[in-house]
Image (cartoon, rainbow, N blue to C red):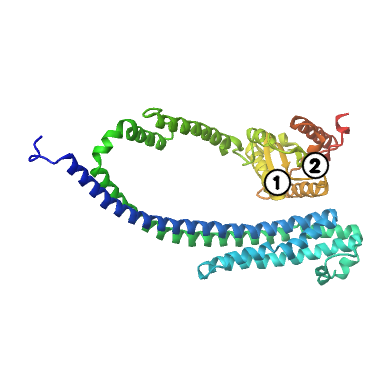
Amino acid sequence: MNAQKGISLRVIQICLVLITAIVSGIMLFFTYRLTATFLRLAAATEEHIRLEKAAHELMDASDYLTERVQRFTISGDVRFLNEYIEEAFEENRREEAVEKMNIDERTSAAMRQLREAMSHSVDLMDREYYAMRLVVEAMGYTDYPEILNDYPLKDADNALAPEDKMRLATTIVLDDAYYEKKDMIRNDMRESLDEIDKLTHSIENEELAALYRERNILFAAVLIQVLSILLMVLLTSVLGVRPVLKAVDRIKADSPIPEVGANEFRYLARAYNKMYATYKKSVERLNFKASHDELTGAYNRAGYDVLVSGIDLNITYMMLLDVDNFKSINDTYGHEVGDKVLIKLVQEMKNAFRDDDYICRLGGDEFVVLMVHSGRMEKRLIEAKIEQINRELENPENGLPPVSISVGVVHGSEAKDVTSLFEKSDAAMYESKRQGKHTYTFYTGKQEE
């Protein structure tokens, strides 16, 4: 081609370099702007996470105090009293959580609800201190925290026998009034978290709007640069760009990507496909519907199998239970009422046991509770929880018939494996049935004789 009739490759190259330099400058500027906006958005998200964590820390501290005082009133073990006092006066997690959330006027609405929760928590502690004073007097302890001196016993309570004082102390921290106060704390915490969500969403919306504006400008600059270097793109499209575009489409369609193109891309495709296969297996394993009972929301048999495969027997209690005379309930009231009874049972179990414990429905009215992170000293606490569940089932609402459960309990240290643990739990539950139902039996070894 005659030089007079066209532009030389050198000129094209110079033009491409100049255009690329100009567009690159624009891209760098708006990339900086985009990065700054993204960092602000990330900071808002981190702040949201931090505030939520602080709110949950307050609830965790309150629940920890509840668990300590309940264990103390049931067992009389002074270790639980000391752990309660240490949390209340040394750890101070609740007060630290409030300080973390007290940032500026933006969090004032959330702080109001948080202070309400703290106020209810303090009221709850008055009940707990009085219950602990009852236990101290019942057990005859002379060395106890001075704070309990601020809670002298009423004359009528002071005149009670030691066992009656222990019983009254347990009632104070397990009755409806106590849990109503706990519910008030949880409601205040939920409202506080709602306020945090509103604040964070407002900030995020502002930053996202700026992010979209700058992204559009950056996209326009990228488009200009792509058009200016089309020749170079054509040279690499077959082995690079085209396989990448196909891979993007497959990723959007949630499927493996084809292993085509350059060797380097094939290596990346194989690595992605391997991770994709692992991810799909994990999703299938963790799928809620696959591991939970549709009626009650408890773990189903599949979920139970996954859970028991990973538990530590030495720190786990297994409780096997079923509803007494459940067939007659179905026959008398119908299966719809029977289903409601099962739903009620699971709800009461969730109320009685910790969030860390696992409730599983194996089929029909047969359930298993795995009480994890529990030593062998939990017997009286478990008894109290089972009795609480039976009390609630005996006094149902919404027209449900009164029912009861029979329970077999065994600690994992009594068994060599999960199969043996289940068999021993079953033997203990059979003993409960033999004793007339509506009771519980701790495995001793005699049940198998």
Name the residue beneath numbered marker 1. Answer: 349
Q: Quadrant of the N terminus?
A: top left
Left or right of 75 on screen, residue 322? left
Mark 1: give few (<14), some (14-19) or many (20+) Cα within 10 Å. Answer: many
Q: Circle 2 — which element?
A: loop
**From mark 1 to mark 2, how far is it between C-alphas?**
15 Å
User: Which is in the foreground here, disc 1 or disc 2?
Assistant: 1
Residue 182 visible in the picture: yes
Disc number placed over residue 201 in the picture, else none: none
Mark 1 or mark 2: name the one nearer the start of the chain.
1
Left or right of 344 on screen, residue 445? right
Q: Circle 1 — which element?
A: helix
Examine the image and state in which quarter residue 35 appears.
bottom left
Q: x%, y% of residue 341?
A: 67, 42
C-beta proximity under 8 Å, tags 1 and 2: no
Q: x%, y% of residue 126?
A: 75, 67
Q: Amino acid at mark 2?
A: His
Front-lying residue, 377 or 134: 377
Mark 2: give few (<14), some (14-19) or many (20+) Cα within 10 Å. Answer: some
In the image, is residue 327 above or below residue 217? above
Front-lying residue, 239 or 382: 239
Examine the image and state in which quarter residue 90 appears.
bottom right
Left or right of 160 on screen, residue 238? left
Q: What residue is shown at x 90% (from left), y 59% (from top)?
A: 139
Name the residue beneath numbered marker 2. Answer: 438
Q: x%, y% of residue 42?
A: 47, 56
Front-lying residue, 232 or 402: 232
Q: Amino acid at mark 1?
A: Met
Q: x%, y% of residue 189?
A: 60, 60
Q: Quadrant of the C terminus?
A: top right
